[in-house]
Amino acid sequence: MSDFRSRGVEIVAISVDSNADSRKLCSSRGYTFPFLSDPKAEVIRRYGVLHPRGGPDGHDIARPAEFLVDSSGIIRWENFTDSILIRARPEAVLKAIDELPPVRAAVNLRAQTEPRPEGAVKAPNMRAPLSRILQAAYPC
Amino acid sequence: MRRSWNSFLWIGFAVVLLAAFSFLYLVQFPATRDFPWVNLLLFAVGGGFLAVGLKRAFANPKRYRGRVSGVILGVLSLAIFGLFYYGTFVITRNIPSASGALRTGVPAPDFTLSDAGGKPVMLSKLISKNRAVLLIFYRGYW
């Protein structure tokens, strides 16, 4: 997390989950970045990452995807996985950020020292019940 | 001559069970989750034990037991492997392609969505502080 902040990159997660669900997720996993709720999948649709009727109850949800938006609002990097088991690892995203010179320039490296150890994609809590660990393989 | 217990069959089946259930633990680590090589390796080892056990049972039925139990364990193991394969390689890839998604170089559409506390968060406001933003879309339903 601090690796992203020190590169001038904020992290924002978006799903169709309600605010209450996001609160639960945040507190149980100790994430320190905002989880935004897009219940009607409007933003998800606009970014072209809709998974129609992908939810367990047939609702539209997001397919897993990551976009890096620079400070001028342009998409500089994106990642679309083929498998919901395989997500961009924080190291890989940081490497991608570092390998994009224009982004670094636009990003304006502002050192912020916030001692927060969380990464973008964190392994599930080891103390979580089995059902949680199973779920963790899929939804996030 | 008393027929001896065909331990390979049971060892093989135990390893197959371990192969399937260890995924619940190994899924936590990207190195063993992105490609479940440990589990596949265990399945291969378990399958090897079962094959040897079955061969013994059928080639030397006077000496080894396990013609019935071996077949049952073998079929069960195949079913477990099939479920594992389906769960990790088929279901997980059942997501639409991102061919219609936005790509590098295009402007990111602005949006305002509320965070977990109900506070509105606006993309253009985030980047206005001269910062970049990593948007992570995830499936949800936790």
Image (cartoon, rainbow, N blue to C red):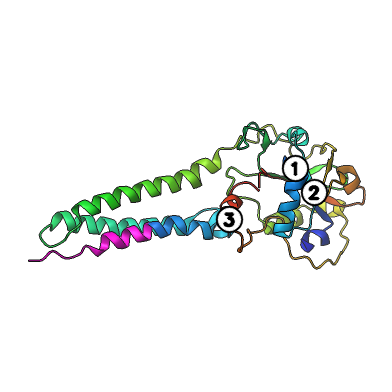
Q: Are marks 3 and 1 on the same chain?
A: yes
Badge 3: chain ID: A
Write down the region rendered in magenta: B1-16
Residue A102 in sight from this viewpoint: no
Give yes or no for residue B15 being in the magenta stretch: yes
Label 1, secondary structure: give it.
loop
The local crowd at label 1, few if under 14, some if 14 to 19, many if 20 or more residues have their Cα within 10 Å, is some
CA–CA distance between discs 2 and 1?
8 Å
- Which residue sits at x=38%, y=56%? B43
Q: Chain of mark 2?
A: B
The image shows residue A54, relative to residue B117, as above or below, that is: above
The mark found on residue A133 in the picture is 3
Residue A75 location (% of width, % of height): 79, 42
> For this view, does A46 lie left or right of residue A65?
right
Nearer-the-camera pick, A5 or A92: A5
Which residue is under mark 2? B116
Residue A18 shows which numbered tag?
1
